Amino acid sequence: MQNNLATNLRHLCADYPSVASVCRDIGINHQQFAKYLSGRSAPSPNNLRRICRFFDINEGILLGAPEDLRRHTTRLAKTDADRRRDPLTDAFPGDLQKLRPFLGAYQIFFRAPNDPTKAIINVAFLDERDRLVYSRIIEALGDDKTKTRRWTRCDGKVAHRAGQIFVVDSERGPDAPLCLYILNKPHRDKTGLLFGTMSYLASLSGRTPTSSPVVWKKVESYRSVRELFSSCGKIDLNSNRIDLKVRQHLTSPGV
C-alpha cells in the first residue's frame, strides 16, 4: 500500500510546476512529503485527508493500484476538457486554498434601495462541494400591510481572485436577474468583516439597476438557523444592531 501511495503521488504531482508548490498549497513540510514520494514514510490520517482534499481524490484511489488512479485521472481529464469550453470555468473557485477560511455563515448589511435611512440584513452561507464554493443567501422582508414576511432565496458561486472575493448569485427561474458582490478583507483585520459593493436589480417598478456598499459579518456561533433568520429584515441605519464599522462603510460618501 505504501508503494502504491508513493507511485500515485508522483503521478499526481507530475501535473504541477513543482513538488514544492504542491507542498506549499497543501501546507505540508517539503521534507516530510519527499518521504511519502519515496515510500520511506506514510502520512498521518490528518495529512492523508489534506492530500486527498487537495488532489480531489478519495483515500481508496490514492492508496490503491496505480492503474486505477490512471483510469480515474483520465476520466477527470475528459471532464475538465468539456468544462474548459465554458469561459468562466477557471474563474470559480479561483484560489480555493485562500477561499476556504471564509466558509461559514454571515449577516449581510446593505442600504435599502428605496429608503437611504434604512439598512437591510440578509443571511448568507458559504460551503464547499466538489472543490467549488457555493453561496446561499436568504432575504426575509416584512410586509407592514399583511404582517407577514416575504422570503427570497438566491444560490450562487464564490471565487477568490486578485485578492478579492466575488459572489454571483440568482433566484430560481429563467428570468431571475443576477447579483454581484465584490468583497475585501482589510489587511490584519480580525473582526470577521468583509467590505465591498453589491450590484443588483431592485425589486421596484422597472427592476432598476442598483448598487450599494455592503458588509458581510461572519457569524462564528449560533444556536440554530432559525436564530440567524430572525435577524433578517429592514432596520434603521442608526440602530445599535449595526456595528460602528458597518455603519461607517454603509454611509461613507462615494462608496
Image (tube, rainbow, N blue to C red):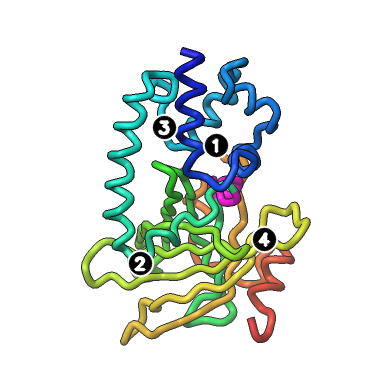
Q: Which residues are magenta?
A: 98-105
Q: Amino acid at mark 3?
A: Ile
* Number of marks in the rendered image: 4
Q: What is the CA distance from the residue labelled 1 to the residue labelled 3? A: 33 Å
Q: Nearer the viewer, mark 2 or mark 4?
A: 2
Tell me: 241 left or right of 80.
Answer: right
Amino acid type, label 4: Lys
- Disc 4 versus disc 1: nearer the observer: 4
Q: Residue at x 47, y 54 (%)?
A: 93
Q: CA gap, disc 2 to disc 4?
A: 27 Å
- Give the left or right position of residue 124, taking residue 241 as reference: left
Q: Earlier in the sequence, mark 1 or mark 3?
A: 3
How far apart marks 2 and 3 lie (CA) works out to 25 Å
**Residue beneath disc 4:** 185
Q: Is residue 21 above or below residue 116?
A: above
For label 2, the SS is: loop
Would you name the residue on which mark 2 appears?
Answer: 87
